[in-house]
Image (spheres, rainbow, N blue to C red):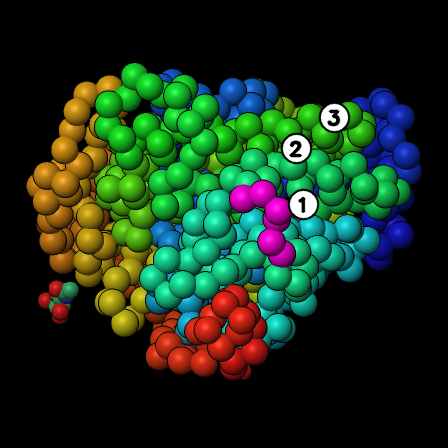
Amino acid sequence: MHASLASIWWGLMAMFTNNVKVPVAQKPNILLILADDLGWNDVGWNNPEIKTPNLDRLASNGVILNASYALSTCSPSRTALLTGRYPFKLGLQHGVVKKGKPYGLPLNITLLPQKLKHLGYSTHAIGKWHLGFCRWEYTPTFRGFDSFYGFYSGSEDYYKRKTAAIRGYDFRMNTKVFKPKIKKYSTLDYGRRAVKIIQAHKRTEPLFLYMPFQAVHSPLQVPKSFEFKYRNIVDRNRRIFSGMVSAMDSAIGMTIKALKQRNMLTNTMIVFLSDNGGTPFFGGNNWPLRGSKATLWEGGTRVPSFVWGKMLLQKAGYTSNEMIHAVDWFPTLVSLAGGTPEKDVDGVDQWQMLSQRQPSRRKEFVYGINSITGRAAIRRGKYKLIEGTAGHYSGWYPAPSSRVVKMKRMKQLNKRHVNSTLLYNIQVDPIESNDLSAKYPHLTQFMLRRLNRYKAQEVEAFNPRKERYSQPKFWGGNWSPGWC
Ligand SMILES: *[C@@H]1O[C@H](CO)[C@@H](O)[C@H](O)[C@H]1NC(C)=O
Ligand SMILES: *[C@@H]1O[C@H](CO)[C@@H](O)[C@H](O)[C@H]1NC(C)=O
Ligand SMILES: *[C@@H]1O[C@H](CO)[C@@H](O)[C@H](O)[C@H]1NC(C)=O
């Protein structure tokens, strides 16, 4: 649709469907919140022990997406979310973009912020990038974002903004190295940054705010006041981790309040999801789902998620068990903004499902394909087929709540090695406890054939050696573009 026609259409839609005066030409604001390593059992609506009042309120007044899938690690999930394409088609299927590796998300692919920018949006990113930074062209402000406040790599100290293994400072305001005067806790700092952006926003333009939080990825760090909320939890990792979740909830609370104060909230579409499952040995938890982050089990890929949109969702206040995948957000949000997604994306527009409680347009998806590790999995309807090893931590890990559980021991107990072709019925067996491959050999063969069709589309994964010249010591102590 032509941009101006789209805006008129939006104005009319808003008037007819809601009977409320909305300035014509007002496309919905989009707030896309991506948590990092937040597991299934790490949010209030799946686990009452976790205190996420702001998220709970939005989730219960929106639509809880109970069958929302992402990739099993950071960079591949961000790829899917911002491009609508499976990472195995772009070379991003093998692990994450590690510090010092000279590659990034290919530059000839259009990202969500570029599309939304083109459709008249102000576009801002706050938090963790992790899609490559060896060259300026790979970084957020060169890829559709008007502003960026955050870090380029995958993890760092929440206060010092420094990376651990190879020491380096990684924090920027747009392209400039930025050193806050006080070493503030990143999660809350990101909330304050969102408030500033919202306060300064010109309301004649729609806003796209992408908030990929650092939280709740390791290292385990949180201000004492948040840890104190969980003083009943004996396990130290779990206690700090839970505090980190609540700090993120608090930052989201600030953001929502600012939108409300500026009368922008009612016309805002909020999407919340985690980039992958939790890491049990770093305090995260996916119970009762099987496995961990970086595995193709449900615990690594089925993520806490919801949508909220006061004026935008015609039906809300329920839990949806319809299937949705991270690749679907690109076409869904581009269409919502009045644009046309590229024909060859893997995602499908799920607006009917989200706004009107229609069935999902998705019957099938790929959990991951990686010919380097020989690991792959596919879902079709209620069945899931896993080929090769699903990943290292293949057990079920209960939350070490108020009881003392020696995580180290649990890690050993559950470090099983599974390497075969497995078939599960996720509808009746969401915890993947009953392999059906021997019982249904024909179905297994059928699923393998479906998987092979996708495998034929895999491109070679980026897997370069680390570039020595990437090291911060060559760049004034900062992780900085310029070495590829
Ligand atoms: C969410 O999914 C889980 C796992 O499949 C299922 O046990 C639970 O009943 C679902 N929740 C709702 C409210 O449908
Ligand atoms: C991007 O470039 C790659 C490598 O040159 C090419 O194979 C691919 O088709 C291009 N993709 C698009 C969407 O242009
Ligand atoms: C898994 O099994 C296959 C087939 O037996 C074998 O080729 C592969 O090396 C095994 N992978 C691992 C990681 O053990």
Which of the numbered marks, if any, corresponds to residue 255? 2
Q: Is residue 70 visible?
A: no
Residue at mark 3 to residue at mark 1: CA–CA distance: 15 Å
Residue found at the far front of this picture: 181
Task: State the SS at label 3.
Answer: helix
Whether residue 475 sits left or right of residue 68 in the image: it is: right
Q: Is mark 2 within 8 Å of ligand 1?
A: no
Tell me which label, 2 or 1, sits earlier in the chain: 1
Residue drawn at (41%, 80%) of the image: 467
412 vs 355: above or below: below
450 vs 436: above or below: below
Question: Which residue in the protein does label 3 denote?
Answer: 260
Give the residue type at disc 1.
Leu
Asked whether 136 or 66 is in front, the reply is 136
Give the residue type at disc 3.
Lys
Whether residue 6 sits left or right of residue 358 in the image: it is: right
